[in-house]
Amino acid sequence: MAVGTSYGLEPQFTLSDEIFRDRQICVTDCYQCAKCSAGCPLTFAMDRLPHEIIRLAGLGQTDLVLDSNTIWVCSACETCTTRCPNDIDIAGVMDYLKERAVRTGRPVPQPQVLAFHRAFLDDIRLTGGRLHEPLLMGLYLLRSGQGLKKLQTGALKEDLQLGLKMFRKGRLSLKPPRQLQQLGALAKLWHTP
Amino acid sequence: MKVSYYPGCSLEHSARDYQESISAVAALLNIDLTEIPDWNCCGATAAHSIDAHLALTLAARNLIQAEALGQDVVVPCALCFNRLKVAEHTLVHQQSALPEMNYQGVIKIWDLLDYLTQPPLLDQIQAKIVRPLRGLRTVCYYGCVVARPPKITQRPDYENPTNMDTLVKRLGGNPYPWSYKTDCCGAGFTISRPDIIDTLVQKLYDRALEAGAECIVVSCQMCQANLDIPQERISRQTGKSYYLPVLYFTELIGLALGHPEVTTWLNRHFVDPLPLLQRRGLL
């Protein structure tokens, strides 16, 4: 695998082939018009622009794309995918790369974002099918390590005040959601082939 | 009129105001919403970000439950709608991806706004107006993934949807044109990256005010939460005192049709819409 910080390396096509095999998305169709980056509302939070990620993926620069903030701060608003003149599902590539980073156990550059996704999936598994929002918040604070950090900075108090306000407005209930009747069928959904 | 209904998790709690206004409007229009039995979470952003297979199976199970009822299904949340549509697309066009799931694809998946703005329903709504919105100045903000990507959502007007604007106009309001109808509010970053929400949402406030709006109308509970809940914080951080109530389109229908519980729904908001509506003589 070619690895480096400059763009002038020997291209490798393993990554693009794998993206095509697993998601039927052809990143090598990209001709770098940068329409995706022009329309992306999240570029202010990214370290590489979306069209750069697509190019680097096409060139097999696995480490560069997997270590980028960009794939984690993409909000999946689908503007890029919608506007790509070459029909590349760019937001789909961002998802593919996130999942690949997680599956290979790589440290991710936005651990709090990953902690949130994991807390969310843990939540619906624990409750038996439906999201319980207060539990999600608790799991996230634990998983991300933000709980302790927020306790030290006093931000936890602000979170609790917000929670209390939501509770008073009837928008938060400590009672967990009703468990699904077909719990067995639900558990099977987690089985990845 | 009978139709199946997939509420989605947040409508049970944090978006209770949306749920209450939907139930009320459905009753006013004689729409019988049948909740899909034993529905589960669609997996939302978390599943499609880190577990593509789970994202499909979670959404697909709901479709199979819905199909068993044999009625079209209406979805009020933009992301739930999108995830169900993605699963439909896969189940119908790429069945090998989910061989264990059997779905015929004969029912239609509706976004709630699309459903309620079908011409006959719009006529019915207009005929029942008792309190026209007296030119209430709004911008309409459509959840991004209801429209995008069009290959999945099958919407022709994905860059410039207009049905919410049409509805507001028919209710007697004044929907202002703006270019941010389908821009992103930051969606699921509410908890993990609130700084991203603040940047995106402040831009939306500024553009809405620039367009001349005194409130924002939404059809997605995630948009509502992201625009409503942090408004005080964003005002504090920027030294500006934003006041832009964020109303569900169903709340506006309830208001125009004179539903007695409108204030109960509105009292659940963080940015209190009552001062604006009282000033405009609507409450």
Image (cartoon, rainbow, N blue to C red):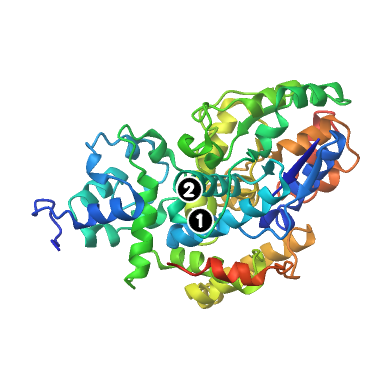
Residue under label 1, please give it. Answer: B56
Q: Mark 2 points at which residue?
A: B90
The mark closer to the camera, 1 or 2, is 2
Q: Distance between the residues labelled 1 and 2?
A: 8 Å
Q: Position of residue B251 (x, y in %)?
A: 77, 38
Q: Mark 2 lies on which chain?
A: B
Say if B91 sits above or below A80 in the image: below
Residue at 53%, 26% in the rendered image: B157
Q: Is residue B115 shown left or right of residue A143?
A: right
Q: Quadrant of residue B39?
A: bottom right
Residue A103 seen in the figure: yes
Looking at the picture, how far across and down is residue B271, in whole percent?
71, 46
Please state which of residues B73 and A105 is positioned toward the viewer in this rendering: B73
Question: What amino acid is labelled 2 in the image?
Answer: Thr
Instruction: Decide which of B70, A73 is in the foreground and name it.
Output: B70
The residue drawn where x is 50% and y is 58% is B55
In the rendered image, residue B149, in percent from the top left (x then y), is placed at 46, 38
Query: Which residue type carries mark 1?
Result: Leu
How many labels, in total? Answer: 2
B237 vs B151, nearest the viewer: B151
Quarter of the figure that contains the N terminus of chain B: top right
Answer yes or no: is residue A154 visible: no
Front in this rendered view, residue B84 or B215: B84
Classed neighbour count for the residue bearing mark 2: other residues with Cα under 10 Å, few (<14), some (14–19), many (≥20): some
